[in-house]
Amino acid sequence: MTTRVLRAIDRFHSVHPWDHNAHYHRWIMRQIPRRFDSALDIGSGSGDLARLLATRAAAVRGLDADRAIVAKARKLTSPAVPVTFTAADALTEIPPGPYDVITCVATLHHLPFTRALTHFRRHLAPGGTLVVVGVARAASPGDHLLGAAAIPLNIAMAWIKNKGRRAPRPDSMTAPTRPATMSFAEIVRDARRVLPGARLRRRLFWRYTLVWRERPARRPYTSP
């Protein structure tokens, strides 16, 4: 693809932006139980997913390293909604759990991959569910093909969501971002070492998904 085309796409999206991560929120909700006690949303941004999780959970924690976006999330959240937002480091300052559901959207590529997944697993309750929507580096022919296919769909989605009008940029995250360094193949390899049986899939709009369920703790055997 030529540089001229890429620049034209960037100009279009500066006028018609939309949130690629929020596009997957409803998919995330289909991966988790209808009712559960506690959830943790890592990289919670302005809190849209955390508030959505609160429609099913008794209590939700939203965690983000960006203090400004945490302050915004608090302002956007009604006191009646059972969500607490905390500005903290996802590797060292996760509030005590365990959690029945842990979500992590477009944040994992900012963290040491294996260490982060290991840490999240420790905070998951027996029988709990970890759901990740992540960003991978395009490396294989399949990655590039899916990325190319996403371009016209991406433009169509931006036009539909904004109804052809100029729209403000999504402000769900204000902290600096960085490109992904791991390919999808590397992500699959390393994730399954930490989370045996994890389900991973490439997705449209330059994302991949990971779903893993912790096995419930076995009850100790007692003789009759």
Image (cartoon, helix red, strand yellow):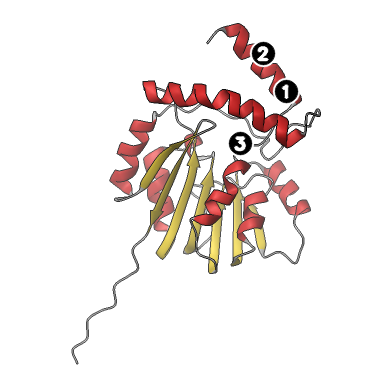
x and y, in percent, of residue 167 in the image: 79, 31
Q: Nearer the viewer, residue 200 or 54?
A: 200
**Is 175 drawn above or below residue 65 in the view shown?**
above
Q: Nearer the viewer, residue 103 or 63?
A: 103
Residue indicated by mark 3: 20
**Residue for point 54% across, 27% down:** 150
Between disc 2 and disc 3, whose residue precedes? 2
Residue at mark 2 to residue at mark 1: CA–CA distance: 10 Å
| Secondary structure beneath label 2 | helix
Residue indicated by mark 2: 8
Which residue is the extreme one toward the right? 165
Residue indicated by mark 1: 14
**Amino acid type, callout 1:** Ser
x and y, in percent, of residue 90 in the image: 52, 47
Residue at mark 3 to residue at mark 1: CA–CA distance: 14 Å
**Amino acid type, callout 3:** His
**Amino acid type, callout 2:** Ala
x and y, in percent, of residue 157 in the image: 65, 33
Quarter residue 21 falls in: top right
